[in-house]
Amino acid sequence: MTGRMMSSLCWCLGYVLFLTGLAAIDTSNNLTDSEVSSVKNVYYFQPEQVHLSMGENESSIVVTWSTFNYTDSVVEYGINGLVLRATGNTTTFVDGGTLKRVQYIHRVTLNKLLPKTHYIYHCGSDLGWSPVFYFNSLPVGTDWSPRLAVYGDLGNDNAQSLPRLQEETVKNRYDMFLHVGDFAYDMYQENGEIGNEFMRQIEPIAAYAPYMVAVGNHEERYNFSHYSERFSMPRTKDNMFYSFNLGPAHFIGFSTEAYYFLNYGIKQVVLQYQWLEDDLKEATKPENRAKRPWIITFGHRPMYCSDDDKDDCLNDESLIRSGLPIVKWFGLEDLFYKYGVDLEIWAHEHSYERLWPVYNHKVYNGSWDEPYRNPGAPVHIITGSAGCEEKTDPFIPHPRDWSAFRTSDYGYARMQIFNSSHLYLEQVSDNLGGAVLDHIWLIKDHHGKYELDVDI
């Protein structure tokens, strides 16, 4: 037994005896109210809501968790009996509700991980440790095939797809999760306790593989503070927009909500748009696109949809697609088209809809028999029916020309990027016991600008 293990064991035995003694004292009413409160607070040193995210690169993982009293932030992790220890930082998060509940968000980055290696870990401090979890570190470079679960609109109540995702996580089916907005419906409710419940619910999947996110409209309360404080996305202060590389793909996550909550100011729209263009310029440099030819964006509210709920995506001039009203500034369709984005992933609509390759409401299929081989425009996928208390959405009776397939079943998408030319995506129906309702192969013999010039 190591010295650290002996020390922890002695501490635990001593702590049990300490509590036993206090219980006996408390029954004889010898403790003051403040002393009783202090003893009760000991429980809140225990880590919970553990989840992972990708760090600055494939060789780093960020472990994030919560406690309800201040503690140090420590992760002990290792392989083959070798135990390593990493420390991080602790930030104070105060919910904006009437109770002003306080919790502490812990973040520890594990750097220089060996590629494709099975690590075990736990997090916390000498005042309390989480259960033991594990993760498989990501391969390094571009010559591998990432596997992702992709969905939005899961919810704390009626998170219907979660049990199936948990089962698939145990089977090591995914390298990463992509949750495209709307988490708990809503995190701020009950003075933040709904957010805590949701983060506890996803721990059985999010503690085992990077859980990457985009913000949705249901995270808006208190200027998106629950979203920005609880998650840890790479190279960003508030998680609103960021990018990362994974195998042969460059992923870009961004906020569609900046366009709809202008009460927080227009500055975020401007900053994000400039950042998006800068990121796309960098990603499309010949040397970068040669290494990572796939460019995949993900944001919550779609540019197009045919759900019968009168959302903005039903409008010909939706804000995300066309830009701010009247002036038509900062629209994203032209920007994504100009830089040759291959795939755009959305949620918000509580349904699944696959579009034909589309730009400016016109379909640009590759050919009549292989529409997704060398298409003339980006492909859009909406997968926002993972669960949630608001139920799934119906569709308008007559779909638009760009709508290829749609279903209101609960479910989620699986995506695998096989290589530089082949990407596979399928939609799973939870209503039908995990049956695959739809699938496509997106095939690109070359990546880059589409043929139609766009001046923006």
Image (cartoon, rainbow, N blue to C red):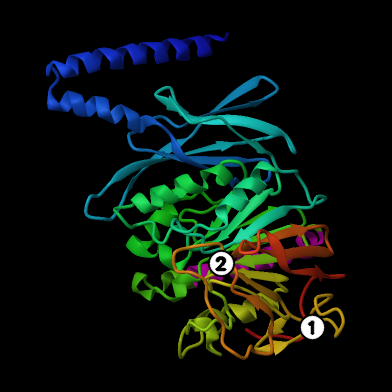
Q: For mark 2, give the secondary structure.
A: loop
Q: Position of residue 355 (x, y in %)?
A: 69, 79
Q: In this view of the protein, can residue 52 be seen by the observer?
A: no
Position in image of residue 256 (x %, y %): 50, 71
- Look at the picture and state if 319 lies above or below 254: below
Q: Residues within 10 Å of mark 1 (few under 14, many from 20)?
A: many
Question: Residue at (70%, 62%) from the top-left corner?
Answer: 435
What residue is rendered at 42% in x and 71% in y?
267
The residue nearer to you, when weighing 265 against 247, is 247
Neighbour tally class for label 2: few under 14, some 14-19, many 20 plus, Cα within 10 Å: many
Instruction: Select label 2 or label 1 by which is in front.
Output: 2
- Residue 230, numbered label: none
Question: Can you say whether 303 is above or below 360 in the image?
Answer: above
Inspect this view and state whether residue 263 appears.
yes
Give the camera-side residue of 272 and 39.
Answer: 39
Instruction: Point out the image quarter for the N terminus.
Output: top right
Q: Main secondary structure of the magenta part?
A: helix
Give the side of residue 273 with respect to residue 115, left or right: left
Q: CA distance from mark 2 to mark 1?
A: 26 Å
Upstream in the sequence, badge 2 or badge 1? 1
The quarter of the rendered structure image containing the C terminus is bottom right
Disc 2: which residue: 385
Q: Which residue is mark 1?
A: 365
Q: How many marks?
A: 2
Residue found 37% across the figure and 72% down from its top: 265
Q: Describe residue 346's horizontal placement relative to residue 405 as left or right.
A: left
Q: Which residues are magenta?
A: 270-290
At label 2, the amino acid type is Ser
SS under mark 1: loop
Taking the spot 83% from the left edge, 64% from the top edge, the residue there is 422
In terms of depth relative to the viewer, which is nearer, 346 or 330? Answer: 346
Residue 393: say if magenta: no
